[in-house]
Image (cartoon, helix red, strand yellow):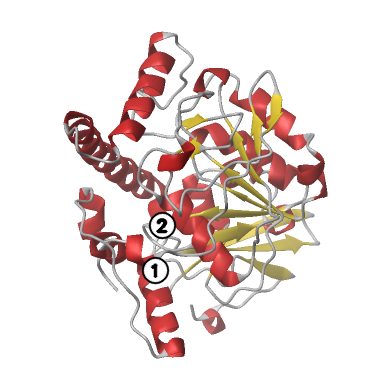
Amino acid sequence: MDLHALRLSHPFFILNNTNTNALSLRNTILGFNRRSRRWLKLEATNTNGAALDEAAFEAERLALDAEARSAMAQQGQASISDSNDPKAWKWIIRKRIWDSMEAHNFAQNPRPVHHRIPNFVGASSAADKMRLLDVFQAAQCVKVNPDSPQKQVRFLTLSDGKKLLTPQPRLRTGFFSILESNMLPPGTIKEACTSVGVAKHGRPIGLDEKIKVDVIVIGSVAVDPKTGARLGKGEGFAELEYGMLRYMGAIDDSTPVVTSVHDCQLVDDIPVEKLLIHDVPVDIICTPTQVIFTNTSIPKPQGIYWDKLSPEKLGQIRILRELKKRIERETGQKLPTGPSEKLPPTARRGQRG
């Protein structure tokens, strides 16, 4: 962005001035006019003159989300039908939870909750319980997933003056963005908790960012309160995000992993022995009615397990390709590649750059 063309006649400060995300094309410049005693707002565009079209951004996000969920539905059904598929048991549990939430009306929009981190009745109450946790109150930076049931957690994080670290959905367009309430225009905290708000107000970070994450909040489809074993919606992005934060030194084994779910999402049939090395266990579970400390003994992932990462997934996520090239350059050794897999249509669109 070339700001030299701007002539500012009042005291201005720039928000989001390092945001170079291709989908976050607008910087916000605020200034206070001492004569009129009013805040002034100027929209600055990037070098190609484009501004963030919020309606188009949201429409594209919803369309890509629908495509991905459709492909996941096909993948899940195929997995359940294949008696030799080692992932079938995960899809069976997921389907049971999704079906139950819809049947008992525990689900909230967006619906149906199938192939999502399901939004649930009482999500705000679960978030309020999370807010009272000692680890949350002491945290200065909280990483929160971008899904609907954790929207209130993102809001509370910013409202309490903490740094919010949140990933781009499916890591489709970037990596993580940082938001801080003192860098947001007045009255925009709620907006900043949405995908559009992150694109407008978040500061994208890279792998070299020096950051310490004090708490990780992760979405779940099902979680075992006795073991801390967790299932997501089946795409593996939470595990990749965790692995990349480990690589950056932002987290370690002691960083608590917290999830918020409906009580009906608590299960007792996740076989720990079938979990994979990159599956992330949960330390604390918050529901609308209770807080559970799992005291999990499941080891936490130590980074990215490249031998489990398919070429298709690698092609989908630019930041992973950058990390792989960096490690190979630093070590002088080529990293292994995992078995091939079929990905949703969004993967093919993401192979640019």
Amino acid at circle 2 = Leu
> Which of pointers 2 and 1 indicates the residue nearer the eye?
1
* CA gap, disc 2 and disc 1: 9 Å
Side (left or right) of 208 relative to 170? right
Picture residue at 55% right of the left edge, 30% below the top: 224
Side (left or right) of 301 relative to 184? left
In percent of width and height, residue 271 lies at 44, 34
Against 132, residue 53 (above or below) is below
**Given contact means CB atoms under 8 Å apart, are the residues at marks 2 and 1 in contact?**
yes
Against 112, residue 31 (above or below) is below
In percent of width and height, residue 93 lies at 38, 26
Mark drawn on residue 320: 1
Picture residue at 26% right of the left edge, 69% below the top: 352
| Front residue (pair 217, 41) | 217
Q: Is residue 61 visible?
A: yes
Picture residue at 33% right of the left edge, 61% below the top: 309
In percent of width and height, residue 233 lies at 39, 38
Amino acid at circle 1 = Leu
Q: Is residue 204 visible?
A: no
- Asked where in the image residue 41 lies, by quadrant, the reply is bottom right
For mark 1, give the secondary structure: helix
Q: Quadrant of the C terminus?
A: bottom left
| Front residue (pair 344, 194) | 344
In percent of width and height, residue 157 lies at 70, 45
For mark 2, give the secondary structure: helix
| Front residue (pair 204, 302) | 302
Against 146, residue 111 (above or below) is above
Mark drawn on residue 171: 2
Q: Residue furthest top?
A: 104
